[in-house]
Amino acid sequence: MFSVTVSNISSSTTQEKLHEFFSFCGNIKSIDLKSEGETAQSAVVTFEKPSSAGTALMLNGGTLDGEQLNITSDVEHHNHQEQPHHSSSPFEQSEKPRAGIAAEYLAKGYSLSDHILQRAIEIDHKQGISKRFLDYMRGLDTTVGQKALGSDQTVSGRVHSTLQNARTRAKTIDEQKGYSKVAHEYYSKAISSPFGKSVLEFYTNTSKQVRDIHEEARRMADQHPVTSSSAANTTHATSTGTAGPDAEPGLATQASPTVV
């Protein structure tokens, strides 16, 4: 069983909110939510994969509905790379870099301390990034580069000024051929933006810093302001690790958990 125990849950937190919070970690099998008196609740969250449970443990101390969650497990859940399997999608949520998952939380408006973000970086550095995710991002580097910049070009091989000029071309190609609908919309558009090279480096390089996660979260949040479902967790972007609607502008992304 790939489960974690969550305590100090606010009495106002519903099972739906808890599911939304932990769905960033990966596919959830079940949530057993119980009352702990009049002011708190606890839950056992069971995931399909051990790496998802490991990501959940990384979030210990994160805030939901104004309360700091205590997330523990009696079992060590290794964040190992999952075995590849046949799927219509190129990778699963659990295969994303942990720093990328942390950025998604911040972009959604959840509050994570810089200590948690550092944990995400350490996991990526220790465990690496799944081969399927790396292959997908490197494929985008080539595919988007060729579509936006010309034959035999890659995003990582071009400088910022060139990408600035290529953005309009990439957008036109997207509209004409629906490329974004074939791939994950956020990643394909992010790679073809003026920030493309830095985005590619963020998702393929384990040498990150906390500020890199904040910057990616701001890019994500730009065109998708925090929704009302997580408004209670939203504040301005600060050193505590929160990205809200007043965060610095950047790229568009999916505002909801990107379980794929």
Image: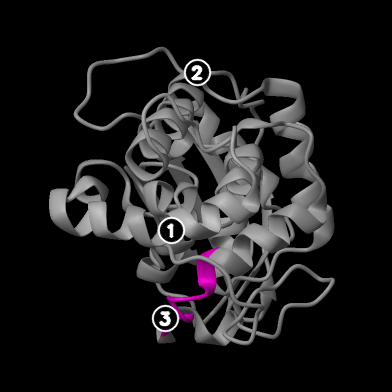
* Horizontal relation, residue 124 to residue 219: left or right: right
Query: Gap in Å between the C-alphas at discs 1 and 3?
Result: 32 Å
| Snapshot quadrant of residue 88 | top left
Q: Which mark is residue 131?
A: 2
Q: Could you tell me the amino acid type at mark 1? A: Arg
Identify the element where label 2 is drawn. Answer: helix
Identify the element where label 1 is drawn. Answer: helix
Q: Position of residue 167 (x, y in %)?
A: 43, 58
What crowding class fits label 3: few (fewer than 14 Cα within 10 Å), some (14-19), or many (20 or more)? few
Q: Could you tell me the amino acid type at mark 2? A: Lys
Q: Residue 229 carries which label?
A: 3
Label whose residue precedes the other's in the sequence (2 or 3): 2
Query: Which residues make up the magenta segment?
Result: 220-227
Residue 242 at least partly seen = yes
Query: Gap in Å between the C-alphas at discs 2 and 3?
Result: 33 Å
* Horizontal relation, residue 147 to residue 122: left or right: left
Q: Could you tell me the amino acid type at mark 3? A: Ser
* Horizontal relation, residue 52 to residue 195: left or right: left
Task: Name the residue carrying label 1.
Answer: 167
Q: Which of marks 1 and 3 is in front?
A: 1
Considering only vertical position in the picture, is 256 above or below 52?
Answer: below
Identify the element where label 3 is drawn. Answer: helix
